[in-house]
Amino acid sequence: MSFYEKLVALRQNRLFGKLAYFLLKLLGVEIPRSVSIGPGFLLHHGGMGVVIHPQTRIGARVGIYPGVTLGRADIFRPVSQSRFEAIVVEDDVILGAGAKVLCAEGILTIGRGTVLGANAVLTQSTGENEIWAGIPAIKVGLRE
C-alpha cells in the first residue's frame, strides 16, 4: 500500500481523517471523506489530479490512474436543481489516466470489472467486464 493509499484509508479515521483529507488535497488528490472505498483500492502514480464527487461509492480492488474525474455533468445548474444522485464504481474496475465519468441524472454505475480507457468521457452506465474508450465513450470490447 503506497503512502497515498494509506492517506485515502486514513480519511475515515476519527482522529486523523481531516488531516489525511487535507494532505491528499495538498498532493493534488480530491477524495472527500464521504466517498466510501472498498478494500484493495489502488491510486496509481500518486493519483495527481484525481477528483471524486462526494456522492460516489467505490468498490473493492478498484484502480484509478492520474487525472481521473468522477462528477456531475450538469455543473451549469445550481446543485439544488441538479438531477444527479450518485456514481457507483463496482469491484475490479480500472479507470485509465485522464478518464472522465460524468453523470447528468440519477445514478451512473460502472459495472464490475469494467475498464475505462485513458481520456475517455463516460456519460452512461456500463455492464460487467466491458471495455469503454473514446469521447464520448463507447463500448469497444469485453474484458476476458
Image (cartoon, rainbow, N blue to C red):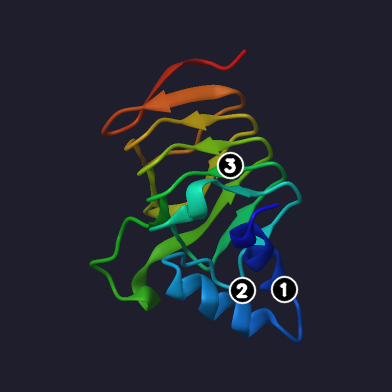
Q: Residue at x 52, y 80 (%)?
A: 22
Tell me which numbered mark, 3 or 2, is placed earlier along the sequence.
Answer: 2
Query: Which x, y percent locates residue 80?
Result: 39, 77
Q: Residue at x 29, y 65 (%)?
A: 75
Q: Are marks 2 and 1 in contact (CB under 8 Å)?
A: yes
Relative to 40, is 73 above or below? below
Q: Which residue is mark 2?
A: 33
Query: Which x, y percent locates residue 126?
Result: 51, 32
User: Looking at the rendered structure, which numbered label has been put on residue 63?
Assistant: 3
| Amino acid marked by disc 2 | Arg
Q: Residues within 10 Å of mark 1 (few under 14, many from 20)?
A: some
Relative to 83, is 89 above or below? above
Q: Which residue is mark 1?
A: 12
Left or right position of 130 against 79:
right
Q: Secondary structure at mark 1?
A: loop
Query: Which x, y percent locates residue 100?
Result: 37, 46
Tell me which numbered mark, 2 or 1, is placed earlier along the sequence.
Answer: 1
